[in-house]
Amino acid sequence: MQCIHGLKASRYPFILKITPCHCSCSVYMKNFENHGRRKKRCKIFLEHKLSLQQNILKIWISWYFSHIVVPMIANNFYVTDRESGRQDVYYYPKPIWKKLVENAITLLKNKNYSMLDRDSLQTILRERRNQLGKNTFGFSRVRFLPKEKDVRPLANLKAPCKFTYAVEKSVKRHVKPVNDQSKFVWFKSVNSALTKIRAILRRLKAEDPEKLGASVFDYNDVYQRLFVFHSQFRTRFTVFPMLYIVVADVSKAFDSIKQDKLDEIMNDVICSDTYMFRNYSKIICTKKSIKSLSDQLCYDHCKKNLDIMKCEASVQLNYCNCILIDKGTDVKVSKKMLHRVLTEHLKRNILKIGDVYYLQKVGIPQGSILSSILCSFYFGHLERNVIIPYLQRSEETCAKSYNRGTDMQLNKEHWSQLADIVSSSNSDVKCLPSGNSSKSNSNRSDIKFADQSLSCNYDDAMAGSYPDGSEVYNSFKPNNLFMRLVDDFLFISTSMDQAASFLTRLQRGFKAYNCYMNFDKFGVNFDVDEPHLSKRIYIGADGIQFIPWSGLLINCRNLEIQADYTRYWSVHMSSTITVQAYSKPGNTLGRKLCDYMRPKSHTLFYDSNINSLPTVALNAYQAFLVCAMKFHCCVRSMPGITRLNPSYILGKILFSFRYLYKLIKKGMSDIKIRFDIGPVLKLKKAELLWLGLFAYIRILKKKQSRYKELLYLLRRKLADHGVDEALPHLRYAVDDSHSSLVWRIRF
């Protein structure tokens, strides 16, 4: 349908020559006895002339593309997407693509993979069928995804596969071969054979998170860690201390894991002799359909109480917006069988590239349902045995150093720097109230800003105290926070010595685990004696320093959190969205606007326990700016949108604002139930709507020739909204200097 977008039948003379009289019905009309009725029927056909010609245009364009354009492109180009700009289509000339793939295969053979001949492959598959029985799985097909400089192999572990065994000649002729002599043998997908192991690891993740070290799996976990860290500051310090941040990324994390080491770790993790599994179904309702998906729950066979089962299901399965149905059927599996399946997956992972098969020697397969959690257990073992003990020793060293007074002068300088910042800056640097952690939920009401004559100095900081009355620095022990999202490390400390020591340790790598960092992706917010080390600090037009980590921008001064929109810089905004051009434009537009709001609705961006009110307002405003850009790209791609009334479009926009507010409130409610934490939203609903209106006006004003009437309605709605525009947090949010990263996005 998109191929005929903008085409008119009137541009093609041969189509204009076609009339309803050329229809097969015209023969019947000529033989019709009643001339009057025949004339009336022809009149109806003539009224549908344009419709007929348009349909013929569609048929002709369809034939043209399917029989000429597509075959011509397929013969000369390899058509694919890319790691960046996933919604765009890229055309690689086949000779160039062949060279890229050959180079990638050569690298794979030199490092992680070895080629398998057909006899070796048959032997592996036969042994697998004999050992695993119904848990047998096959191999994975690979496609290559282009990156900036090379290509990345992506294995499809979701699809079943078939293998052709070599048929052995029978002694007797015409005897049908059986078992392994059959021509085709189907194997189920790799992921389907790993569902029980995933259920076990999901249970261990919920019950024994210490085995995962510093692992976090989503923004909920990140929020919980940051909330606790902020609470410690509010309890311990009168003034927000200087913070030293280190960000690191493991180089080729999945491809560098030692298989024997991971197998040994997982053998200790999966330690029970037998495991019980309960079958569940998930009923997921969407606007288009209702889906039923099967899943399994690992539970203790001693716990047969239904209430306990329900509780475990809610924790382990942890599915939102769905109904869990207990099928009432159990499966018992031995540790021996589970370990066989996992070992087979880790040590004999087979990939098919073209017509050639490869065996993975180092690393674990990406695309597996276990990849992320296996990686987390592997690095969790590294952290528990190497990194965390190292940090504990560095804390003791820092404490001794402070007791000797070697770093006290340095800290005086730090507090003096903070006082200079507070006295000269108009940003949201804040003093922290001392007191009991039970008052943490209301702390932001006590925050003062620089324009209210806030003064903080070293003596004030030293006057702070613990709840037990001891002075702040009498312990001389640095506070630190250590997190890892799969292979992305984040370390925050109040001691520069400890942060620098941690950086040095990461740079050395961990030989026993074959774990080394990517030196191009280190990030620090302090000076180090490494001239070739890139700090990866983002500094906006307002001069505030941020360090990016896993889609977040972390304020180096006060640990406030903003969304990282820098990933949009390299692509046009239209390359990040998809639109059904000929669907109902009104419904599509409303659904898309809500979808655009959902990713930036997390409590992490709006909780006043972590972010000040100006930053909360800024996060909402930036989310609306990006949504307005996507709105413009969406409208430009939908031909039927011009027929909609601007008032109707305004209604869809306002609905998306209210939808975001509901998502924020619901997210905070879920966090409170899950973590027993009390998030606070100080931004009022009316203020959120005002920010949305202001953001849309700012964006659409740049394309005002298309949106004159809609802009008029938006401005009138903004004027009638009744919100005081002079409020400090609103003025802070709409200041362009604080959103300079958004204004660099092309739309």
Image (cartoon, rainbow, N blue to C red):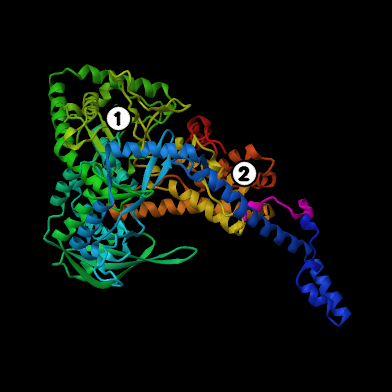
Residue 483 occupies which quadrant of the picture?
Answer: top left
Disc 2 on helix, strand or loop? helix
Confirm whether residue 217 shows in the render. Answer: yes
The three-letter code of the residue at mark 1 reads Ile
- Please say whether residue 320 is one of the residues in the magenta stretch: no
- Judge whether 386 appears above or below 422 on screen: below
Q: Earlier in the sequence, mark 1 or mark 2?
A: 1
Please identify, in this view, whether the residue under mark 1 or under mark 2 is nearer the observer: 1
Q: Residue at x 75, y 71 (%)?
A: 24
Image point 28% across, 61% down: which residue? 314
Q: Which dot marks residue 140?
A: none
**Mark 1 surroundings: few (<14), some (14-19) or many (≥20) residues within 10 A:** many
**Dot 2: few (<14), some (14–19), or many (≥20) neighbours within 10 Å?**
few
Nearer the observer, 460 or 104 = 104
At 66% from the left edge and 53% from the top edge, which residue is drawn?
4
- How far is mark 1 from mark 2, CA to CA? 43 Å
Which residue is identified by label 2?
719
What stretch of residues is rendered in magenta? 1-13
**1 and 2 marks in contact (CB < 8 Å):** no
Q: Which residue is mark 1?
A: 245
Specify whether 398 is left or right of 245. Answer: left
The N terminus, quarter of image: bottom right
The amino acid beneath tag 2 is: Ala
Q: How many marks?
A: 2
Q: Residue at x 47, y 66 (%)?
A: 289
**370 or 583, which is in the foreground?**
370
Query: Would you say 551 lies left or right of 93 here?
Result: left
- The image position of residue 98, as x and y in percent, is 44, 40
